[in-house]
Amino acid sequence: MTAAEFVLEARGISKQYPGTLALDDVTFRLRPGMVTGLIGENGAGKSTLVKILAGVERPSSGALFLDGREIALRSVRDADAHGIGIIHQELNLCPNLSVAENIFLARELSSHGVLNRRRQEERARAVLAELEHPIDPKALTGDLPLGQQQIVEIAKALARNVRILMMDEPTSALSASEIGILFRIIGELKARGVAIVYISHRLEELLGVADCVSVLRDGRMVAEAAAAEIDVAWIVEQMTGRPAGLAETPQAAEAGAELLRVESVSMNAASGRALLRDVSLRVHAGEVVGVYGLLGAGRTELFECIMGLHPEIAGSVFLDSKRLDRMEITRRISAGLAMVPEDRQVSGIVQSLAVLANMTISSLRKHTHWACLSRRSEAAAGDEMTAELKIKHPGLAHSIGALSGGNQQKVVMAKCLLTRPRVLLLDEPTRGVDVGAKREIHAFVRRLAAAGMGVVLASSELDEIRATADRVVVLSRGEVAAEFRAAEASGEALMSAASAAAEGRAGKA
């Protein structure tokens, strides 16, 4: 294939940040009507490369070519004018605007210079219908659950007449059925000649949708291959530089005394719709309890109720047999609860703070004496967590924004662990995390349990639940649909319980 046959080509791209060479002489080519899987561990340079292709960042050296002609992308608007679109891993939405307003932000539809809201809403409704998701275009985006916000992000890209579409972890918050719809849309885009960059840490999923694969490691392009000629083991070896193999995960000690008890918790949305119905669960010392469910099952709402974010709920929460009802969140943290939230960008990190400040923000009292913060004690805690969680960062004083998504997630985990919790709640802890970091997090979760902590891990990924949990509670439409011991928790059993309960209720509606 000649250079002119590549719709977009990046030649010799390097990107230097203070103290970090994010990309080193990378060449990357996209063919029309094909899906190119872009793979690499967190920090390998994937997001940096995509940002350069989308006009968000400018390279330190190298050049971009569109249809064989050199172009300069100085902004996202430049990229948009060339038919280049992006679906961001970290949602790029305005929560105070409606769904339709977000979809057409900076590209508003007007008639004679006047904003045409009706036309925008009709067009937004059509795009959402294509995605088989009946979201109200007038709904406030910030009021939508994370999965629906992900759908809006995808709709925003599809509403543009793109020639090149980059998808950065587009399925991280989607259910299995929604992923199937997205794959159908990808097939239609390919048929129209759209070139697609697909980034995902779900390697089986990526191999199922990609035509070819490019692998980045430490900022360099190390391998390229046709997807039909490789497997997951090959990808892992190219990503890590070592043969693929399952990391040994220590088994938890035998479950001990009861730590957490949730009794008959129910919660309604402002509209009156039930989000949780009579949910109960128990967690013991040394035990990892998995909470599995499809999108909208109530996993996040359950965690928020346990942490005291919804004081109006019915039911009770007990920690070490002590009732926590009407106890505010700070007191629950002091009592021994901690939560890693599903959306780290919104609820997990503070973008304006450094890495160390993000780690210690919830445990500053432990480093304070007579109202004076001990910088030495705080730094020692940061160093401890860096080593324990294998966090890669250019320095504790650097901005949290300088870290990859996976390392930001580890910082959020460090923040929780520095409060010294008795029970740790993990809501989708490996969302947007590469396979190596995912295994590290899974192994670390098992070590925490082996040390006597109680862990509750909510996930929509069957493999993650089965790799970590001693016991699995299945939620469906806000109810406990089933409970399994680890030996019984096959993928078929979990999916059947989650979907059958939902279908049963739908049939009664």
Image: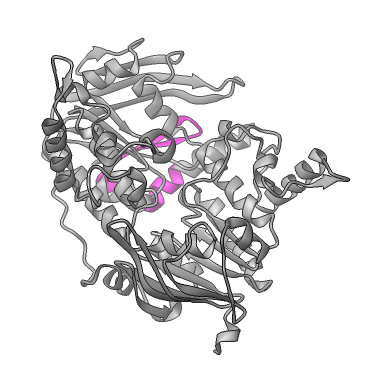
Query: Between 218 and 473, which is closer to the camera in this rendering?
Result: 218
Residue at figure coordinates x 13%, y 30% from the top left: 256
In the image: residue 382, left or right of residue 412: left
Label total for image: 0
Can see residue 110?
yes
Q: How is the image coloured?
A: one colour
Counting from the top left corner in percent of width and height, residue 221 is at: 36, 74
Q: Is residue 481 magenta?
A: yes
In the image: residue 35, left or right of residue 403: right
Query: Between 233 and 389, which is closer to the camera in this rendering?
Result: 389
Counting from the top left corner in percent of width and height, residue 246 is at: 21, 62
Q: Is residue 141 magenta?
A: no
Counting from the top left corner in percent of width and height, residue 437 is at: 27, 54
Residue at figure coordinates x 11%, y 33% from the top left: 376
Can see residue 489?
no
Location of residue 259 by image quarter:
top left
Quarter placement of the C terminus: top right
Location of residue 163 by image quarter:
bottom right
Looking at the image, is 304 positioned above or below residue 207? above
Counting from the top left corner in percent of width and height, residue 244 is at: 24, 69
Looking at the image, is 235 positioned above or below residue 252? below
Query: Between 128 and 79, which is closer to the camera in this rendering?
Result: 79
Quarter placement of the N terminus: bottom right
Query: Between 6 and 106, which is closer to the camera in this rendering?
Result: 106
Q: Which residues are magenta?
A: 471-497
Q: Residue furthest top?
A: 326
Looking at the image, is 462 positioned above or below residue 242? above
Looking at the image, is 327 positioned above or below residue 41? above
